[in-house]
Amino acid sequence: MKKFKLLTLGLVTCAFCMLAAQGVAVAQGDAEIEAEFVAMLKNATLKGTWAPIQQGRLGAEKGNDTYRIARVEKNEAGEWTIVSRISVRGQTIEFPISVSVKFAGDTSVLILDNVRAGPGKANWSARIMFFDDFYAGRWWETTNPEHGGAITGAISRTPDTSP
């Protein structure tokens, strides 16, 4: 009788765990979750802080770290592009960067692998998590992981004024 109760308890526990996991899990490519990610970064400003990585440790936090995002696009092949806005010599230009985006439930993770972005000859990699109008992550020079840092901040949006 004791074994039967333990077996029953074990089966019920497994059943509840499986049901709970099905309710929470969101498959890669879930249109609603992807649409929320796209909306979160449309006409967005990411404003926060960063800290350098020094000898494998997080260095002193620096303020006033800002990124402007025009939009996020996903093409029919499932490839993602982040279109950032950059001010150069008094003009604003849009700069597209090809990235991967993965989803852990309702949390987006932007993956940048060995991409030349910005001035200089270095290639960069990053992992940035987005959730509920906040972001946090790690970036580094691909060939020199000591040259990089951690970022965190809040996301705000400007209303779309285009016709």
Image (cartoon, rainbow, N blue to C red):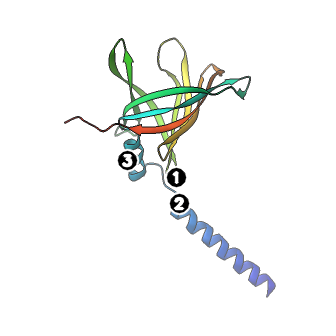
**Crowd tier of the residue under label 1, counting other residues whose Cα lies within 10 Å: few below 14, some 14–19, many 20 or above:** few
- CB within 8 Å, label 1 to label 2: yes
Instruction: Depth check: give the residue in front, 50 or 121.
Output: 50
Mark 3 or mark 1: name the one nearer the start of the chain. Answer: 3
Residue 125, image x, y percentages: 56, 27
Tell me: 130 left or right of 93. Answer: right
Which quadrant would the C terminus be assigned to in this image? top left
Image-quadrant location for residue 55: top right
Above or below, 16 against 80 in this view is below
According to the picture, the residue beneath numbered tag 3 turns out to be 35
Residue at the extreme bottom: 1
Q: Amino acid at mark 3?
A: Ala
Residue 65, image x, y percentages: 52, 27
Instruction: Depth check: give the residue in front, 107 or 116.
Output: 107
Above or below, 21 against 134 in this view is below
Mark 3 or mark 2: name the one nearer the start of the chain. Answer: 2
Q: Amino acid at mark 2?
A: Val
Kindly report the distance in space between the C-alpha atoms of the residues bearing marks 3 and 1: 14 Å
Image-quadrant location for residue 97: top left
Residue 146, image x, y percentages: 67, 21
